[in-house]
Image (cartoon, rainbow, N blue to C red):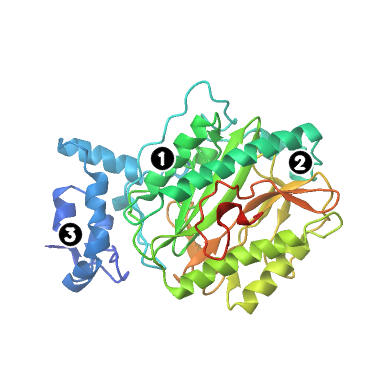
């Protein structure tokens, strides 16, 4: 391994101590120093099984010039054009909270011209959403809007189910993004996250300690990982939004407990949805169950109104004793999407400006549904279908065994 300058500001990829060496293979491939640095030979050997995947992730399918590799890395590390983020070698020292690291990302996927697009698709800037009156008051949807939402949410469910079937050890989160993108386009929809405030991919994939908004990249999923896939589809002039956290192969009991408890938090929250219920009560129900199972609730992100706008009123916090104002009324549509941590609730933003990870590096899980308040209760617009894959052991009877 090549020795770095003793005053190098880079951190070891494995333990975050000051780095003194870099991987020789990464050196040959001309990868950025920050993607190849280790504090010692011991850390390098211990990280090899995971680290080596980055070599395959950036190599062209056919051998090419050094310039091809350099250009691939420019695409891979340029996460957020709005912030002007460049290659990893230019990212300042970051105190990573867990073992996960960003890997290169592929170029933005193309959308055929015939697909109807939201107003941020070209320049990354939503126009209608921030100026809408529905940011300050909650829309009561018409029957025509509700029917369009039903159709869009069903497609979103089918897209997430396609992603779920693709998850296994060795698959990259970029592979999952490709499945989501292709399934959305095939249904005539646009992947809502794509270029939304410059987000570079068609879905969010949040692995292990990542709470939400993880960017699909070249890292291969490993046996024992957990991964949340967050899918949003724009179709019929409206958005449908849902996510689930999946097991990659066999996972440890603590991770099963975390994911199952998070699922139960959402299920219990949905059970109270009906006209007259205060939005703040959702957080009380979720916090109570999370505390009973020894887990914590993330406070930085909340559920939101959805429809012709991707995000609008109401905001629905998931933590207890919150100050959300207002009550549910028939015809309202919103998401509930609790993020539950094994450790403390606090989060830490990665340098990419999107990826939120747990502050202590412990694992996090999330589930989300888009919900319609009816005259008598709630309709889960993104409910599991009879064809949904049976991926959760606590749901007896397969994909159709639960309304959620």
Q: CA distance from mark 1 to mark 3?
A: 29 Å
Residue 37 numbered mark, or none: none
Circle 2 Cα neighbour tier, 10 Å, few/some/many (<14 / 14–19 / ≥20)? some
Q: CA distance from mark 3 to mark 2?
A: 52 Å
Say whether disc 2 or disc 1 marks the residue closer to the N-terminus.
2
Q: Which residue has dot 3 on it?
A: 23
Which residue, as the protein is rendered here, is positioned at the far front? 397
Closest to the observer, 380 or 332 = 380
Looking at the image, residue 375 sits to the left or right of residue 254; the answer is: right
Q: Which residue has dot 2 on it?
A: 134
Q: Which residue has dot 1 on it?
A: 178
Quarter location, residue 200: top left
Closest to the observer, 352 or 10 = 352
Secondary structure beneath dot 1 equals helix
Closer to the camera: disc 1 or disc 3? 1
Q: On the rendered image, what quadrant is the C terminus found in?
A: bottom right
- Figure check: 136 above or below 250: above
Secondary structure beneath dot 2 equals helix
Residue at figure coordinates x 56%, y 32% from the top left: 189
Secondary structure beneath dot 3 equals loop
Answer whether labels 3 and 2 touch (C-beta < 8 Å): no
Q: How many marks?
A: 3
């Amino acid at each position: 391994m090549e020795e770095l300058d003793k005053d190098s500001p880079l951190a070891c990829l494995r333990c975050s101590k000051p780095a003194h060496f870099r991987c020789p293979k990464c050196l040959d491939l001309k990868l950025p120093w920050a993607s190849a640095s280790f504090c010692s030979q011991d850390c390098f050997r211990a990280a090899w099984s995971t680290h080596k995947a980055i070599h395959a992730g950036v190599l062209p399918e056919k051998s090419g010039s050094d310039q091809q590799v350099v250009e691939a890395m420019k695409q891979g590390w340029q996460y957020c054009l709005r912030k002007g983020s460049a290659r990893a070698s230019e990212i300042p020292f970051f105190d990573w909270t867990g073992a996960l690291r960003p890997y290169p990302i592929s170029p933005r996927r193309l959308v055929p011209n015939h697909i109807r697009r939201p107003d941020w698709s070209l320049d990354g800037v939503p126009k209608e959403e921030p100026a809408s009156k529905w940011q300050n008051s909650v829309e009561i949807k018409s029957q025509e809007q509700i029917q369009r939402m039903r159709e869009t949410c069903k497609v979103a469910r089918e897209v997430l189910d396609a992603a779920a079937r693709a998850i296994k050890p060795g698959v990259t989160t970029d592979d999952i993004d490709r499945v989501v993108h292709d399934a959305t386009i095939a249904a005539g929809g646009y992947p809502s996250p794509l270029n939304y405030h410059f987000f570079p991919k068609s879905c969010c994939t949040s692995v292990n300690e990542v709470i939400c908004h993880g960017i699909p990249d070249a890292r291969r999923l490993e046996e024992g990982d957990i991964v949340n896939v967050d899918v949003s589809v724009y179709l019929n002039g409206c958005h449908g939004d849902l996510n689930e956290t999946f097991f990659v192969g066999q996972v440890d009991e603590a991770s099963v407990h975390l994911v199952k408890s998070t699922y139960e938090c959402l299920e219990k929250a949905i059970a109270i949805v009906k006209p007259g219920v205060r939005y703040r009560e959702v957080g009380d129900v979720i916090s109570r169950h999370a505390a009973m199972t020894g887990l914590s609730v993330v406070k930085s992100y909340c559920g939101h109104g959805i429809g012709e706008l991707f995000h609008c009123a109401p905001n629905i916090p998931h933590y207890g004793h919150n100050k959300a104002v207002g009550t549910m009324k028939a015809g309202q549509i919103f998401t509930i999407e609790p993020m539950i941590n094994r450790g403390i609730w606090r989060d830490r933003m990665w340098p990419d400006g999107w990826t939120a990870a747990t502050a202590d590096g412990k694992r996090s899980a999330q589930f989300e549904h888009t919900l319609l308040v009816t005259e008598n209760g709630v309709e889960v617009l993104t409910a599991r279908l009879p064809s949904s894959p049976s991926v959760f052991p606590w749901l007896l009877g397969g994909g159709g065994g639960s309304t959620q």
